[in-house]
Amino acid sequence: MNKRQFILTFIITCLWSALAVSQTGNIKGRLLTNDNQPAKNVAIYIKNSNKGTVSNENGNYEITNIPVGLKKINFSIIGLNNKSIEVTIIENKTITIDNIVLNVSQEVLNEITITSKRKNKFNRKETKYVARLPLKNIENPQVYSVITSALLEEIQAVDVEAALLNAPGINNVMKGVGSGGTGIRFNMRGFSADIAMRNGVSTAFVTGTDPANLERLEVIKGPSGTLFGNHLTNSYGGVVNRVTKKAHDKFKGTITYNTGSNSLSRISADINTPLNKEKTVLFRVNAAKHNEHSFQDYGLTRNLFVSPTLTYKPYERLQLTIEGEFYKNNSPSTYFNISRSKITNIEDLNYNFDNSYGSDYLSSTSDSYSIFAEANYKISDNWESQTIISSSNVDNNANYLFLDFFNNSEAKRRIMNITSQFYITQIQQNIKGQFKVGNVNNKLLVGIDNYQIKTPYRRTQLIYDSIGVNTPQLDFNSKKYEALLAQNDAFRIGQRDQSSFGVYASNVTEVTQKLSIMASLRVDWFNNKEDEYKQTVLSPKFGAVYQIVKDKVSVFANYMDGFKNVAPEITAEETTKFNPEYATQIEAGIKSELFNDKLSFTLSYYDIIIDNAVRWENNKGDWSRIQDGKRASKGFEAELIANPFKGWNLIAGYGYNDSEYLEGKESIIGNTPYASPETTLNFWTSYKLPRTVLKGLGFGFGLNHTSDSFLSDRNKLTIPGNTVINSSLFYDHNDFRIGLKFNNITNEKYWANMGANIQPQRTKNTVITFSYKF
């Protein structure tokens, strides 16, 4: 059975099970205050269900499709005692409830509503993905940061790279190479990482993505192999989870147009609508068309992105969701290789930032198609089942341009052409719930995970010409390139065919109301089918949280384990097999959520050790992997998110990292691994006028700082640090938004570092945004 048949069978099975639709009825009514005024914005919900609504301006409410029987209905006002009544739901009938009077005046209710609405929009850390259990941030022994949709809107992010820089410790964000793809690469806690996870399951990690359907980014710190497996957590510094926008039961949407420097022209749409009267079938689509010229003389980016989402709720306990992502990318892939240039600092490179030494013709293309299907079934009030299938197909045709400098002003233009396809499938089944042992509460997750990837590829390399960086630049001749490509045989043709099967469990025990302990374990079986190479790995995780002030301040500690199944090194002479890499992290810190979540603060210290580290070794110009290293990475991170008063929001992060090789070749012992700066800083603040005739007018200011790093593990060449300053001016209305963003206003000329390859980053630029909301 192929993947498409399997997914179709899954969907049909779920839909068939939905035919046993439970009998339902409806309720409606009106709420009044004790001074006989309409009670608006009051939450009404059915106990032990996901059914609920909010009263409108006239105090009216209605809830449909409620399973028949005796139900308890709660009327909730923040800061006051809830009121509840019992109603018998009758099949196909609408029960009208007599006016209910709440024990609150309209004046007090308005004050409560205003206060509850003033939430910290940068602080939305509720998540079902990080622990895969219903844990608040204050209860979770793991550190994570969330880049919210509100922050994405304020910084006017037109790409994911800009968004990532708003999490503590993240640095050197760039589009990296990888088997023909051009996925986003970055550094975190001293380790290279990429975005490999979408809503908790795998996606094509070497393929770029668009922020159009992005609800939030969750930056999960430290080795996370226990819950997510090595195929998603190939970095020991952490993993980034893309959380996408979900369909809901309101008709609304936003149309946005971005323009600005470098011929930026981007239009995006976000439209949501229920498809039936009962609002059990919900549809949402996000789409974007992005065109932009490079900030340099050559280089065009042309992207198209469409992501539809369909959610079906056949009855109260079952929800089915199907999502798609279709992304077409055409963009330049140019990298500077200065390892043989004999310079000791990138500032010694005789280079003009206006020149790309590339071509509008020479670009990399990628077409990706991903389908995600999810079924959530509530087994009982305390237990639920989650079944997920994801499938991604990617077709890459990469033309990586490497500028190989052999001194500070001359370089060879080397082109690597890689054609490849990625076929990725993941099937995941989770059971999670709550139970008691005596009087002790427990939250349990048990899951299985099957992951498969096939990647046929063909790699060809050629030298196009040699250039002097100060001579007038010539564009590429397409006929010459095609002729050279035809003359050169592929130096490697092959297919990666790997799979892993994992079983995992995680339990959180509430020893007391303030003390909880987490224990988790995963077993992973890895199979590299190409050479029948197999590995089995155990990965534990432990954590403890003590809440000094319940739901306000906690101290935490964790021991986390990560691993990486390393495929053999295949050369013409021999095949070298590697043991799994292992990472262990010990971390401790403090978390606080104060003043009704208006002030959030996290401070943590971590210590990571890597055993069996595989690293790249240069042997007379030939690069190969060897396994002789032991690495250490330790440091601390701090994050502050605050809403001091109405209209003012800020987020700030600081990271300090001390990484070094403890074992390995004598020339690298004690050295800092490549692309690992010692300090990073991120900051963004904004103020929006809450009153007066200028209500909605606002401005923002932020910066990102990264200290020096090294080009390679040999620590011979320094990549200088940088400080990039940004600002914005905007007007936010209920029906529209206008924004003006100034990026890199000091015109800092800086580089992103991926080790052997570096990239110049955008100079000063402006983004203008027009959004219409309906």
Image: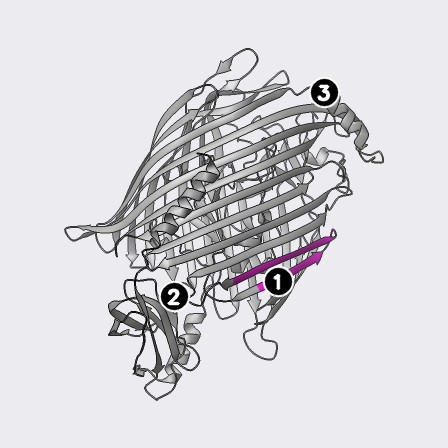
Which amino acid is tagged 2? Asn
Vertical placement of 227 versus 578: above or below? below
Residue 87 image position (x, y, % from top left): 25, 74
Whether the magenta-drawn stretch holds residue 255 is answered as yes
Whether the magenta-drawn stretch holds residue 540 is answered as no
Residue contact between numbered discs 2 and 1, judged by CB atoms under 8 Å: no
Give the residue at x 41% y 71%: 116
Vertical placement of 380 versus 715: above or below? below
Which amino acid is tagged 3? Asn
Residue 488 is tagged as 3
Which comes sooner in the sequence, label 2 or label 3? 3
Residue 309 image position (x, y, % from top left): 50, 54
Residue contact between numbered discs 3 and 1, judged by CB atoms under 8 Å: no
Give the residue at x 34% y 74%: 77
Disc 2 versus disc 3: distance between alpha carbons?
A: 65 Å
Residue 407 image position (x, y, % from top left): 74, 26
681 lies left or right of 750: left
Camera sees residue 339: yes
Look at mark 1 in the image and give the residue it sits on: 255
What secondary structure is the stretch in magenta mostly built from?
strand
On the image, which quarter does residue 48 sit in? bottom left
Residue 596 is tagged as 2
Disc 2 versus disc 1: distance between alpha carbons?
A: 33 Å
Residue in the foreground of this view, choosing between 584 and 58: 58
Q: Give the range drawn in magenta.
A: 254-272
Residue 196 image position (x, y, % from top left): 50, 40
Report crowding for label 1: few under 14, some 14 to 19, many 20 or more residues within 10 A (C-alpha): some
Which amino acid is tagged 1? Ile
Of the residues tagged 2 and 3, which is closer to the observer?
3
Q: What element carries label 3?
A: loop
